Image (cartoon, rainbow, N blue to C red):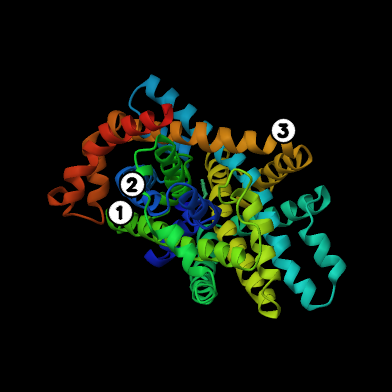
Amino acid sequence: MASARGEFSSRFGFLMAASGSAVGLGNIWGFPTNAASNGGAAFLFTYLILAFALAYPALMAELIIGRHARANAVTALRSISPGQKSRLLATTVGFVGILTVSFILSFYAIVSGWMIAFFFDPIARILGMDGLAQWLTEDAVLRNSLFVVLFMVFTMYIISAGVKDGIEKWASRLMPSLIVILALLILYVITLPGAGDGLRAYLVPDFSRIADPALLVDAMGQAFFSLSLGVGTMLVYGSYISKKENLPTIGSLVALLDVGIAVLAGMLILPAMYVALNNGVQIFDESGGLIAGPGLIVSVLPALFNTMGAVGVFVAFAFFALMTIASLTSSISMLEVPVAYGVEHHGLERRKAAIAIGSIVTLVSLVIVFNFDPLFDLVVTYTTEVSQPLLGFSFCIFVAWIWKRNDILEEIKQGCPEVESGLFWKIWPFYVKFICPVAILVVYFQ
Ligand code: PHE
């Protein structure tokens, strides 16, 4: 089986794929609004600390387990578990991870579907098809269903093609485009009247908020979701990294790219919101907070683009292209988790596994679309606020308490022979053993 496994062909390919997984709706949509409603730069500051102190060590745990085992999440966790009890735990954690990531994908695909619909809206308007444009931007079960299916078909198509010809190829095309579009949008929006107020709301810290438990919980949830942790995604991507790679270095590059793009996204979204305010668009909700969540992306920003005249059509096009790319490079990493399991554990052919599992996830998405109010928030809450932190905690337990320290060292040494004398090995083992699990639990029980 091992010889049939894929591998990323270059460091660049891995970095694009892993940062593509990490950079998603969580960065461009979640992070900026979380920051704005949690004391601006005070949130940014806490987020940076938590991302590097807690999320980076957890990311390393997944990458190391993955590359060592060269297998899907269930098989990988079982392979580092010495006893019967720990193997049972491994199977459970692996499965819960696979289920969790599949449910995350089921709601993520709905939101991504909206992004594609809004991406087609400016095209329809340029072509003078106003009726179609209106249909594309109106929330309706039929529209949502069609675009969920379209998005999932793209996702399945890429995953069917495998690691190198699917994930790596597409991420290496899409991620550089994402960075260019983001930079161009920032440069444009920042010149508009009102943008300065947005930057101030984002970058001037309100330090009275820093010890606020809500801020801590939000910042940690954001960091874990944003780095795609706990659900086996990074483990599976890690399993495709060459043994010649230096893991601590590429892990930190992924974390830096993710955090960097989140911080940049804040420099787009908040100025854009205040430009919208300047143009007469409502940006605060009844309780006086900034409008976040779906309202921000599908009503505030489109309203802003509408006030920009002809340029607005292009800005809308670029913005929703950005959102669609960010979603797609994340969704493929989600689907890869169950598919890798199906292929390796059940001997399924990759294409069949991608289509079968992708179709099941699409069906779950459709059930949510048809029962949006009772189900959507429920699925989001259970997967991201309950399951993901607990799984992150379990991964730390596996790597630090169950797996043999020497095996870990041997694994990292491949590609990084000097690790033992470096800073990483002085700090990281202690961190994942004590600080990470305790901190995750403390924040969880807040
Ligand atoms: N990191 C992605 C984002 O920020 C979401 C994600 C979660 C991707 C879990 C994979 C696994 O949007």
Give the image quarter of residue 159. Answer: bottom right
Residue 359 as seen in the image, left or right of residue 176? right
Furthest-right residue in view?
Answer: 131
Crowding around mark 2 (Cα neighbors within 10 Å: few <14, some 14 to 19, many 20+) is many
Is disc 2 in contact with disc 1, using a CB cutoff of under 8 Å?
yes
Crowding around mark 3 (Cα neighbors within 10 Å: few <14, some 14 to 19, many 20+) is few
- The x and y percentages for residue 433 are 26, 33
State the residue position of label 3. 374
State the residue position of label 1. 247
**Residue shown at the point (34%, 54%) measured from the top left:** 251
| Marks 2/1: CA–CA distance | 8 Å
Furthest-left residue in view?
Answer: 421
- The x and y percentages for residue 17 are 47, 59
State the residue position of label 2. 60
| Marks 2/3: CA–CA distance | 36 Å
| Label 1 beta carbon less than 8 Å to ligand 1 | no
Instruction: Tell me the amino acid under the disc marked 3.
Output: Pro
Furthest-bottom residue in view?
Answer: 310
Q: Tally the marks.
A: 3
- Element under label 2? helix
- The x and y percentages for residue 311 are 66, 79
The mark closer to the camera, 3 or 1, is 3
- Element under label 1? helix
Residue 106 as seen in the image, left or right of residue 393? right
Instruction: Tell me the amino acid under the disc marked 2.
Output: Met
Residue 164 as seen in the image, left or right of residue 409? right
| Label 2 beta carbon less than 8 Å to ligand 1 | no
